[in-house]
Image (tube, rainbow, N blue to C red):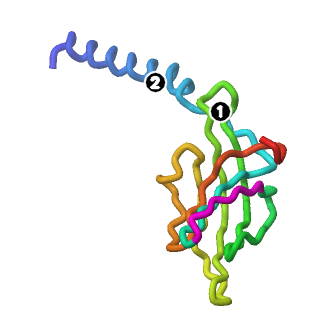
Amino acid sequence: MTQKKKKKNINLGLLIRVTIFFFLPLTVSAETIKKKYASFKLLNKTTNKVSTKDILVSSKISWETLNIEVLYCGSTPPTEIPEDYVLIDVYDTINNENINIYKGWMISSSPDVTPLENPIYDLWLVDCSNDKTS
C-alpha cells in the first residue's frame, strides 16, 4: 500500500470516529418521567363492553376476573414524541385458578405490539398521568 493510501485510510477512520463521538450523544433519548396512575381500557369479548380504569402505580386491583398489578408507569419528556409505557403483571382468576397471563411492558401508541392475548379480554394502556382525571 502506498504512503498516500495509508494516510487517506487513517484520515477516513479518524473522521468516522470524530463523527460518531459528536453525533452519538444526540441520538440517545431522555429518561422517562415517572407517573402515578396508569389508565387502561378493557374489552370483554363475551359481552362486547369496554370499561376504563385508572390504577395507582405499585398497587393491585381486581377487574372482572383479572388481577392487575402496575409496577411502573412513565411518559416521555414534553420535548419528545408523546409516548407512555407501563410495566404490569396480570393474573386471571377464572375457574378459581390464579394463572399468570401477562407480565411485561405495554406501550400506549402500539397496543398491537405488546398485547394481552386472552380469549375473553383485550387490555390496553391509554396513558400515564399524575392524576385520575387526565
Check if residue 49 falls in the magenta segment.
Answer: yes
Location of residue 35 by image quarter: top right
Give percent across and percent down for residue 6.
24, 17
Task: Work out whether residue 87 or residue 116 is closer to the camera in this orientation and state it.
Answer: 116
50 above or below 134? Answer: below
Give percent across and percent down for residue 24.
51, 27
Going by the numbered disc 1, the residue's amino acid type is: Ala
Q: Tag 1 or tag 2, which sits nearer the N-term?
A: 2
Location of residue 55 by image quarter: bottom right
Q: Is residue 47 left or right of residue 70?
A: left
Check if residue 73 falls in the magenta segment.
Answer: no
Q: Is residue 15 left or right of residue 81?
A: left
Going by the numbered disc 2, the residue's amino acid type is: Ile
Task: Work out whether residue 12 or residue 88 is closer to the camera in this orientation and state it.
Answer: 88
User: In percent of the image, x 63 and y 83: which residue is there?
Assistant: 94
Location of residue 91 by image quarter: bottom right
56 above or below 74? Answer: below
Q: Considering the image in quadrants, where does the C terminus appear? A: top right
User: In percent of the image, x 52 and y 59: which residue is there?
Assistant: 115
Q: Is residue 69 left or right of residue 109?
A: right
Res 20 label: 2
**In the rendered picture of this protein, how many numbered marks are placed on residues?**
2
Give percent across and percent down for residue 88.
66, 62
Magenta span? 47-54
Q: Alpha-carbon distance for marks 2 and 1?
A: 19 Å
Secondary structure of the residue carrying tag 2 is: helix
User: Local crowd at mark 1 within 10 Å, few (<14), some, or many (≥20)?
Assistant: few
Q: Circle 1 is placed at which residue position?
A: 30
